[in-house]
Amino acid sequence: MLTIPAAAVGPEMAAPGWIVDQSASKLGYEGVGNSETFEGSFGKWDAEINFDPAHLDQSIAKVTIDTGSASSGDPSRDDPLRETSWFNISAFPNAVFATNGITSTGPNAYVADGTLTIRGVSQPVKLPFTLTIEGDTAKMQGQAKIDRTAWGLGEGSWQDKSVDPNVTVKVDITAKRAS
């Protein structure tokens, strides 16, 4: 797990670093295929997080996702995700979400304005989330609905209406303050 130490980026980036507890965290997705709702998750991903609710201008996050680790538990759905029509993991093994800014929308409520890059295509994404910090532990939950076709996901024969273009990305992270 990576964090960005405040000293490495200078005084303008002094928000504390957070280390994700992978065993208590999940990066998942929900979609609809053949009129059936399904859920899945990514088994391999890393996050670099510096966050301070009192200094949102200094807060950043970058999540790198191993797209080949996507799993819904159904090989007939999961195996095609690795192929060129979907994630094309041989050419693009990772997706990246990087924040451009974080704003408060109420008590313990925020929106991360970021850029999601999949298959070399970058698109803006807003991720609304809630965050509670108790002592040195932070709990973050959020979700965003994206149109997978904006990244070219599901090309060719997958462009029919059997797979809904909208996918909900679900984030559930527990992190400890870096010492």
Image: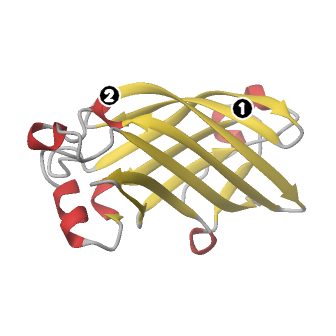
Could one spot residue 11 in this view of the protein?
no
The percent coordinates of residue 58 (x first, y second) are: 74, 30
Instruction: Tell me the tag on residue 13.
Output: 1
Question: Relative to 35, is 170 on the left or the right?
Answer: right
The amino acid type of the residue labelled 1 equals Met
Question: Relative to 51, is 1 on the left or the right?
Answer: left
- Label 2 vs label 1: CA separation? 32 Å
Mark 1 neighbour density, 10 Å: few (under 14) some (14–19) many (20 or more) = some
Residue assigned mark 2: 150
- At x 50%, y 38%, the residue is 145
Q: How many marks?
A: 2
Badge 2 marks a residue whose secondary structure is: helix
Badge 1 marks a residue whose secondary structure is: loop
The percent coordinates of residue 156 (x first, y second) are: 9, 38
Mark 2 neighbour density, 10 Å: few (under 14) some (14–19) many (20 or more) = few
The percent coordinates of residue 97 (x first, y second) are: 48, 39
